[in-house]
Amino acid sequence: MKLKDKVAIITGGGKGIGRAIALRLARDGARIAILDIDPASAQAVAEEVNRLGSRGIGIKADLSRYAETKQAVDEAYAEFGRIDILVNNAGIDQPKPFLETDDAFWDRFIAVNYKSYLNACHACIPYLMKNGQGSIISMGSDAGRVGTAGELIYGGTKAAIMGSSKALARELARFQITVNCISPGPVDTDIWRSLAADEKGKKIAEGVVRAIPLRRIGSPEDVAGAVAFFAGDDARYITGQVLSVDGGLTMIG
């Protein structure tokens, strides 16, 4: 129970990678607040956390809106009396060639992917500072590290998160708050399955698998394990880092 008595906030924790992170941190002893725009999904994961013997709550929040995010974080603090870990997981993806996108598409991705990161960090950091320590773990992406065709906007928002996290790591180091990023490669989620739904997508997916040295797509649990590491004491001297979880696809130094 490496995270016993810790409290973790997970944004976008109602499904996929966020759900896997919530369950993994709960198994490690943390109490969990799931913030998600879909209250039913958030509550369902909270109930799974409770069945594991921990304590979970689901809170509805549009994380692209600062006031809603702040209210949700305050509610989590009122429930648990502390916040130790913030996992910025909320995000969307929709691959499209750049010239097929428009400014409404850009604004939506920036709001959901990047502004939600800013909102959650801004709302949680004062509570982390009260403890004299804490950890912030955010989802970047290999698309933001090496570039992926059709994901200019998505990759840009993820690169922004990874770059901002390095700056934030420097600002918060004196408070013993670590700030790190996970950079997943392809992961078996609803988004991945939708991309591989037709014959063309299936061929692309098979090509991706062949390019991965470990010869498989990542699972949400693979990502959750890396988050658990950064959230625990074993990573207390690691900050400002980006860790690719991609089966060796990129091997970035």
Image (cartoon, rainbow, N blue to C red):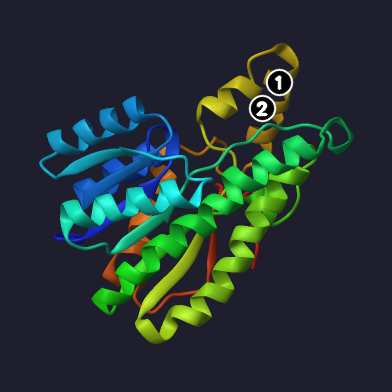
Q: Nearer the viewer, residue 202 or 11?
A: 11
Residue 143's disc is none
Say above or below: 184 vs 164.
above
> Mark 1 packing: few (<14 Cα in 10 Å), some, or many (20+)?
some
Q: Quadrant of residue 55?
A: top left
Residue sitting at x 68%, y 19% = 202
Quadrant position of the N terminus in the picture: bottom left
Quadrant position of the C terminus in the picture: bottom right
Mark pair 2, 1: CA separation: 6 Å
| Secondary element type, mark 1 | helix
The answer to whether residue 73 is seen in the rendering is: yes
Outermost residue to the right: 99
Q: Nearer the viewer, residue 96 or 42?
A: 42
Q: Quadrant of residue 45?
A: top left
Query: Which amino acid type corresponds to the residue marked 2 in the rendered image?
Result: Ala
Outermost residue to the front: 67
The answer to whether residue 226 is seen in the rendering is: no
> Mark 2 packing: few (<14 Cα in 10 Å), some, or many (20+)?
some
In the image: residue 141, left or right of residue 190:
right
Mark 1 — residue? 201
Say above or below: 144 vs 83.
above
Query: Which amino acid type corresponds to the residue marked 1 in the rendered image?
Result: Gly
Q: Position of residue 201 (x, y in %)?
A: 71, 20
Q: Position of residue 138 (x, y in %)?
A: 48, 57
In the image: residue 50, left or right of residue 186:
left
**Image marks 2 and 1: residues in contact by CB distance under 8 Å:** yes
Residue sitting at x 35%, y 71% = 126
Mark 2 — residue? 205
In the image: residue 241, left or right of residue 44:
right
Q: Position of residue 56 (x, y in %)?
A: 20, 42
| Secondary element type, mark 2 | helix
